[in-house]
Image: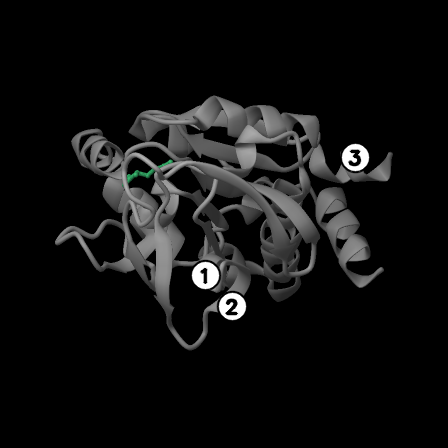
Amino acid sequence: MSEDKTNNHIKIGVLAVQGAFAEHRQILEKLGIETFEIRQQRDIAQDFNGLILPGGESTVQGKLLHDLGLFEPLRERIESGFPTFGTCAGLILLAEELSNDSHTYFATTPVTVERNAYGRQLGSFYTEENFEGIGKIPMTFIRAPLIKDAGKDVQILAKVNEQIVAVQYKNQLAISFHPELNSDLSLHKYFVENIVQVHAANAYKKGEDASEHFTSVSSLRHSAVLAAQARLSA
Ligand code: GLN
């Protein structure tokens, strides 16, 4: 339907140095979105509209990002407003502060995160909880980090047992669990509709200045932006 048409022009890069990147690609492709893997610097030279930081092991991913020369270019992009979705280890990479680790990575989302907050052995569980703007969705936690504290402009989108498991800060969606391990497509759809397409449409409205800010825009065809705008105002 028209949804697929809109999504056809959106291209999302999935960080693929370690972890559950293939599953994210499968979900996005079910939504009709083109994806590619980010493994080295030349992968991000192409035009694309959003970035996914998958779950896995944040220490390994952090080291590889530096070794591959991907760290600084990606950090700059995220900081300048590029639509980014971090899941689990991806949340750790985005967190401004880690309560139980002296490292930080991109540090672009003003939250304090505790790594392995549910313990190393008993850390995996499944639940269904409300996600702001979507409703009840499946949530799979695997040695998950928890969001202990969120800065004032951070929107809290989901809690499990009173603890924050999902936030949005401007262009950044960051969650503790693994949405790519369930067949539910709603969270990826949320990312595309509420962050990727909104940024693309805003940048289009603001013209050239904004397109400098949102690197994704140049790749969006005029019709895709109009379709996104129409969807947003519907
Ligand atoms: N425990 C991992 C870390 O600290 C995150 C786990 C995950 O991504 N499922 O990096």
Looking at the image, do the residues carrying marks 1 and 3 touch, with CB atoms under 8 Å apart? no
Query: For the residue marked with disc 3, what is the amino acid?
Result: Lys
Binning the other alpha carbons within 10 Å of mark 3 as few (below 14), some (14 to 19) or many (20 upward) gives some
Judge whether 197 appears above or below 62 on screen.
below
Disc 3/disc 2 C-alpha distance (Å): 30 Å
Indicate left or right for 43 with 219 as reference. left
Query: For the residue marked with disc 2, what is the amino acid?
Result: Gln
Report the disc number at residue 164.
1
Q: Is residue 46 visible?
A: no
Residue 99 placement: quadrant = bottom left
N-term mark: 1 or 3: 3
Q: Residue at x 74, y 50 (%)?
A: 228
Classify the position of the N terminus by image quarter: top right
Q: Please provide percent x and percent y for residue 56.
A: 34, 32
Q: Name the one closer to the observer, 122 or 187.
A: 122
Q: Which residue is mark 3?
A: 5
Q: How many marks?
A: 3
Binning the other alpha carbons within 10 Å of mark 1 as few (below 14), some (14 to 19) or many (20 upward) gives some
Residue furthest bottom in the image: 152
Residue furthest left in the image: 102
Judge whether 229 appears above or below 57 on screen.
below
Disc 1/disc 3 C-alpha distance (Å): 35 Å
Whether disc 2's CB lies below 8 Å from ligand 1 is answered no
Q: Which residue is mark 2?
A: 155
Q: Residue at x 78, y 33 (%)?
A: 4
Disc 1/disc 2 C-alpha distance (Å): 10 Å
Whether disc 3's CB lies below 8 Å from ligand 1 is answered no
